[in-house]
Amino acid sequence: MMKAVNDSLLVKFQSRDTPFGMTRATVSAIAKELGINEMQVIHIALSRSATDVLSTYAADDGPLTAKEVLALRKDAAKRLPKGKVVLRDALFG
């Protein structure tokens, strides 16, 4: 069981539903439909919003330098298969 965090946040409901806020009636209807309480509805909405808005990976260091690209190409050339190219027609013909 998860330990409850002692932080709290006051939620002020909107007077009408908009893309940026909900009425208490809408939140209550969602809770009833899902069979959960209103706080769980709010946490689900926050979780989905975080997934949509926040990166799921750490930011990289930006584009590769020309030197790094050259090094990668040299490394890839060593690892790529060598030999005669077989045409698709020859494989299945």
Image (cartoon, rainbow, N blue to C red):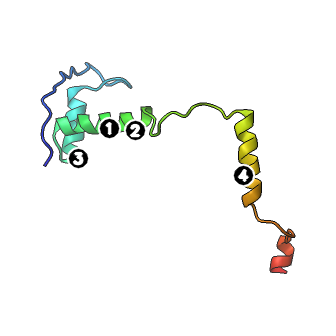
Q: Residue at x 18, y 21 (%)?
A: 10
Q: Amino acid at mark 4?
A: Asp
Q: Are marks 1 and 4 in contact (CB under 8 Å)?
A: no
Pick the residue in front: 55 or 38: 55
Q: Amino acid at mark 1?
A: Ser
Question: Image height check: is 22 above or below 70?
Answer: above
Whichever of labels 3 and 1 marks the residue nearer the N terminus, that label is 3
Q: Are marks 3 and 4 in contact (CB under 8 Å)?
A: no
Tell me residue 54's x, y (percent): 42, 33
Label 1 sits on residue: 47
How far, Cα to Cα, is label 4 from label 2?
Answer: 36 Å
- Please tell me whether mark 1 or mark 4 is closer to you in this view: 4
- Please tell me whether mark 4 or mark 2 is closer to you in this view: 4
Q: Secondary structure at mark 3?
A: helix
How far, Cα to Cα, is label 1 from label 2?
Answer: 6 Å
Pick the residue in front: 11 or 78: 78
Question: In the rendered view, does 92 fall on the left or right side of 5?
Answer: right
Q: Residue at x 80, y 79 (%)?
A: 92
Pick the residue in front: 15 or 53: 53
Label 4 sits on residue: 75
